Amino acid sequence: MEKHHKFSIWYVLLGVWVVLIIHNYLVAVLAVEVIPYSRFLHLVKQGKVAEVAIGTNQIQGRLVDGEKGGKGKLFRTVRVDPEISRLLDEYNVTFKGEVESTFLRDLFSWLFPIFLFVGVWYFFMKRMTGQQPGFMSLGKNKARIYMEDDLNVTFDDVAGVDEAKQELQEIVEFLKNPSRFTELGGKLPKGVLLVGPPGTGKTLLAKAVAGESGVPFFSMSGSEFVEMFVGLGAARVRDLFVQAKQKAPCIIFVDELDALGKARGFGTLGGHDEREQTLNQLLVEMDGFDPTVGVILMAATNRPEILDPALLRPGRFDRNILVDRPDKKGREAILRVHLKQIKTVKNLDVERIAAMTPGMVGADLANLVNEAALLAVRRRKKRVSMKEFEEAVERVMAGLEKKNRLINEKERRIVAYHEMGHALVALSLPGTDPVRKISIIPRGIAALGYTMQVPTEDRFLMHKTELENRIATLLGGRAAEEIVFHDISTGAHNDLAKATDIARSMVKEYGMSEKVGHVYFARERTSRFLDTGVQGAQEYSEATAELIDREVRRIIDAQYEKAKRLLEEKRDVLDRGAAVLLEKEKMEGEELLSLLESAGSSGPEAAGA
Ligand code: ADP
Ligand code: MG
Ligand code: ZN
């Protein structure tokens, strides 16, 4: 359950308001009117006073019952005449000698609303959290202990993330037998950070590690640490580690770690200090514990970029494991895991369902299977068939499209050709980094696909041809789009920016343009602090500026033509590669290479610069 009842200032204001309202009401009900002494005497003489209590300097009393049968009004007056008893006797007023204290009444009119408010708050807190909100237990940590019995998640329940599983296998081995590891002097990471988009199975993986190794699992979400009262978050962290060390070997899992590293919202009490204190405590504890005792700290986040860099330093979360969106094969595997829970027709084409669901993550697929099962129930079917799945895909997709993560078929084709364009140009030109992986699995909003090139060696010098080839590779995406669709898209703007950067540097910094010559022109802003904002503080003439622009343009144009020519020559490979990408969504570098070889043209060849 989500627990979003932070200690907001609004709760306090609401509380104060409610208390005031009730107090006012009680005061009105228990109203005691203060009247002048003369009026009091007058009332006595009129026979309207029923009874009084006389104090040393104050008289309280009640009037005779009203006409409408209501109880007589209460009043109070300051005693002026000490010899009043005779008068009272004369007019038949009951009287006694002690003043009735108003203290209790006042106290009551304040305490009652406060107790009422606290009571209501207590009641709701209990219902929301299912826990005692008592002040005594606030400092204790809420980390639940999952023993292996009630946590029977294993690696078999997590599919499509084989690389992550492989990396975690080592941790499982260690937790199963910590002493064997440490005897050999092996060193393990203290902290493992699972990074990936929401719903890819990070939480599930952490549980599976605990399940596989059969150790206690302490889990806590980052937002839980950020407590309502200052200092308690830090106390919780301390407590958590104390408990964990007692149960070693075990796993401490901090879900949504970014909640600790994220700036807190407006209107919350405690603010940054609280978060920082908690974070600091976490860092202190991480530095203080020795992984050889068998405590492994795991955490998950889908926003690693906003994490405090201190968390990622060596000795802390020093191992990052990427839990990425699944490709088609991965989705098929995940579907199979969840299909075990429901009854389906025998010849269900799981591969086809996987093909229909590009961009979906594990959580979406689990949801999809559930939707299909519900549809079948509604139709009173005994088994879930392809028809239900097709409908469920439509439903889930429609929901997801609103979250704008999925791309349509036409866009997928464009992205596939675009990425193939990069990859083919890179493979065909010497001096470009080898292509390791091509993917059209959408990730986030910006990147629709990517072509991963990994340098084979560290480079300190780059030749002119290499730079040109790099530009050509960057432009390969757009060139492919133009060749195939006779139209270009916005998907290349990042490529264009990079290509232009390189070309500009070639002209202005590296002296690689014959027309501009072997000169260096890049020093525009000598100092950021002295920059007065005056434009055009350049060290070259307007004419040179124009020449530079023209040269940049010439280099880009030439490389674009080169990329286009290359791709047109290899059009069949381009088509076949794009088809493979559309089918499998991912392609390894070797695959592409063999595709290229089978087309007759082998490996990198010297192309005219
Ligand atoms: P995350 O923590 O990455 O946001 P979760 O681990 O909470 O995602 O996943 C939510 C649910 O989605 C899981 O309980 C599981 O049912 C399903 N799921 C997600 N990823 C996978 C996966 N790789 N294999 C099987 N089921 C998955
Ligand atoms: Mg999670
Ligand atoms: Zn591109």
Image (cartoon, rainbow, N blue to C red):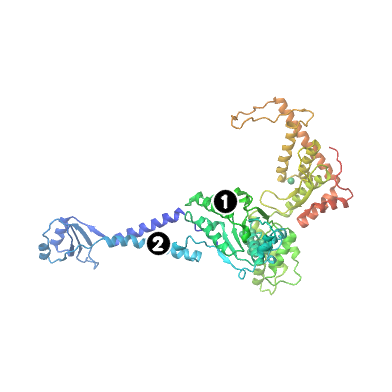
The residue at the point 57 percent across, 66 percent down is 145
Front residue (pair 227, 328): 227
Residue 90 spot, x, y in % from top left? 10, 65
212 sits left or right of 561 in the view: left
Q: Is residue 366 visible?
A: no
- Residue type at the position of mark 1: Gly
Q: Residue furthest right?
A: 600
Q: Which residue, given by chain and number where applicable, does mark 1 sit on?
A: 261
Q: Which residue, given by chain and number where applicable, does mark 2 sit on?
A: 117
Residue 69 spot, x, y in % from top left? 24, 68
Q: Which element type, helix, strand or loop, lies under badge 1?
A: helix
* 344 shown above or below 533: below
Q: Is residue 603 visible?
A: yes
The residue at the point 13 percent across, 67 percent down is 92
Residue 602 spot, x, y in % from top left? 88, 48
Front residue (pair 275, 123): 275
- Residue type at the position of mark 2: Phe
Q: Which element type, helix, strand or loop, lies under badge 2?
A: helix
| Picture quarter with the C terminus | top right
| Picture quarter with the N terminus | bottom right
Front residue (pair 94, 434): 434
Of the two numbered discs 2 and 1 on the same chain, state the one appearing first in sequence. 2
